[in-house]
Amino acid sequence: MSVNTAEVSLKEYLGKYFGFTTFKGNQEAIIRNVLNGNDTFVLMPTGGGKSLCYQLPALILDGTAIVISPLIALMKNQVDSMRSFVVEDGVAHFLNSSLNKAQIQKVKQDVTNGVTKMLYVAPESLTKEENIQFLKQIKISFYAIDEAHCISEWGHDFRPEYRRIRPIINEIGNAPLIALTATATPKVQSDIQKNLGMQDSTVFKSSFNRSNLYYEIRPKVNAVKEIIKYIKGNTGKSGIIYCLSRKKVEEMAEILKVNGIKALPYHAGMDASTRSDNQDKFLMEEVDVIVATIAFGMGIDKPDVRFVIHYDIPKSLEGYYQETGRAGRDGGEGQCITFYSYKDIQKLEKFMQGKPVSEQEIGKQLLLETVSYAESSICRRKSLLNYFGEEYTEDNCNTCDNCLHPKTQFEGKEQLQMVLETIIAVNQKFKADHIINILLGNVTAAIKSYKHNKLDTFNEGSEHNQRHWNSIVRQALVMKFIDKDIDNYGLLFLTPKGQDYLKKPYDIMFTLDHEYEEGDDDESIGMPMDKSGSADDELLNMLKDLRKKVAKKKNVPPFVVFQDPSLEDMSIQYPITIEELQNISGVGAGKAKRFGQEFVELIKAYVEDKDIIRPQDMVVKSVANKSLLKVYIIQSIDRKMDLNDIAEAKNLEMGELLNELEAIVNSGTKINIDYYIEKVIDEDKQDEIFDYFQNEAESESVEEAITALGEGDYTEEEIRLMRIKFMSEMGN
């Protein structure tokens, strides 16, 4: 049904139902379009007030609006919010798998009686035959498809069941459509319109620029420590930390708690009541930080989230935009900090193996965009908005790391010409990596088969590396000299501006990109924090003297007490309690208790005597590493399982297993591998090696042991096995 919009005072309705006096941005125009019975496409960033665009027309129009939404938590949140505005509880309901029979009956009754103005359903519930039959009998005012980007494979949260929405609507009965999303590239927008059969809809597109958000990319080095420091420097502020895996979410929440930060985890692997409970605690400010996978946050309306930290980089820029968009929804401060390491990208690529080729291609394209954004040195805001088809014309946004700390620029006229000429030479039918391979002179299979090694520009750019050319291509895209044919997996073509440039080139400046250091290993969370700074030589010498004294007293070689890297770390971090000593690299709880007391007493006296301000980082406590692998190894050895079988079961080389055993023993855990040693090393050899470590060795070095005992007589594996036995018996 359409309503005579001239007669409808929308502001009256807005005040009556929601208590607002004015609309935001395009809201009024969108609502009038829905009331007029037109298909409507709404592209509005997080925090722009999308929900109101279908809630208000639903309250005004006859019948029930069907709101299709992807998440149960989101539906609940929306329904609760609606009920708080309207006296009658039945005005909004959801129909999904979380309801029992009696509750479903109540929902259907309220809908049939005309009480319910909004019925929220999941796409899966929509396809159930009994629900289709029920919905055929009721008067539907319009369909609202929330989070409509889920319909596109190019969107960041693709759900195949969203593809079935249009056929089901056709079956239930036609009514106007309103599709809403907070992120959509031009490609995703056209996908949504095509799939929902709404190519003729009126499109309302708000600016994607969130001017209150600050964007920063940091190298993923000591990331956990950095996060703790950041949160402690922003006490009392609400924030979200995103991690890619459930395991990482649990570990991060644990380590934050240990360090006195009120944090809770949130991921799809938790049972629904714990998840909902943790979400509520965050909304009610009982905790400051939620550590989550992307399962958290879709549609969660907490306006005062002050920071969003990505410990792992998202799979796509849309995901990044959506997640960072949860900060500062009230227009106040919003800090968006992402830790980036190319290793994480490689991990994400690995996850894609085994998927259909088309899906892999799309995934790689999306990842490439993310890498480009992270490594780029141009304004973050400019890059992001360009990705969503919007131009940002300011030279400096003053709210991103690249604008606040500008990078070196260089003259790039010739290099831009090379790129444009190569794209033309291959008939604008290849992706960026192929173009760059031509410029670098790399003879790949594709270059060979298309004879592109015969082109004039082949090898013309070999004085620069791949990273440099990636940067030129990326900046040429942002400057609109070239564009991507996204329907064909990102083939590059020249824009009119690029064609004009080739005819009449002019001087142009490019910016040098970031070179990020190698990041932390994935397993570093909860492990001893990396050292920063340089050793205090005076203290280091005192610690070495003490080590000698303790070793003599215990009748063990000094390296059994603590190894050199551990002493160096002590002279940087100044641990003054046994608990702090456990955070030192190579020192576990066992070692700290057995040998640590004299060391912390010496350090404490030294710190007081010299008036030393200890590094603040030292207050970062680590969580005991609950590595399942280590637990498995220890349990298997207790059962006297053959080491080869343990290695095979965990897909490890023998050398890798020995690394794990050394780490276990060095951190103070006692293990007994005599049963295995008896099998593989002669008794005489055992005695000789043990005696060497006890009486002759000056360090734990395997190389030195082989030299001393005679090369050719002993294998590296034999010496390592005996060293593990020696360290376990003498040191633990």
Image (cartoon, rainbow, N blue to C red):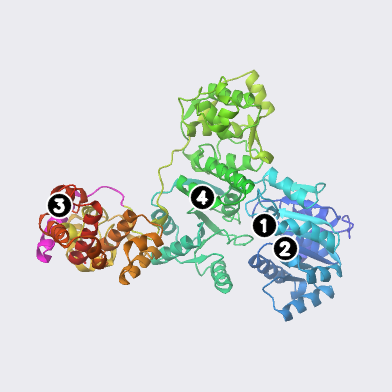
Amino acid under disc 3: Asn
> Residue at label 4?
350
Is 585 in front, or is 353?
353
Amino acid under disc 1: Arg
Q: Is residue 301 magenta?
A: no
User: Which quadrant would residue 301 be assigned to in this image?
Assistant: bottom right
Question: Is disc 2 surrounded by few (<14), some (14 to 19) or many (20+) residues within 10 Å?
Answer: many
> Residue at label 2?
123
> Residue at label 3?
541
Question: Is disc 3 surrounded by few (<14), some (14 to 19) or many (20+) residues within 10 Å?
Answer: some
> Residue at label 1?
159
Q: In the image, which is nearer the foreground, mark 4 or mark 1? A: 4
Amino acid under disc 2: Pro
Pinpoint residue 247: horizontal percent, then vertical percent: 47, 62
Pinpoint residue 619: horizontal percent, then vertical percent: 33, 60
Mark 2 or 4, nearer chain start:
2
Mark 2 or 1, nearer chain start:
2
Pinpoint residue 515: horizontal percent, then vertical percent: 44, 38
Q: In the image, which is nearer the foreground, mark 2 or mark 3? A: 2
Q: Is residue 542 magenta?
A: yes
Is 308 in front, or is 592?
592
Q: CA distance from mark 2 to mark 4?
A: 30 Å
Tell me if residue 452 comes above or below residue 639 in the rendering. above
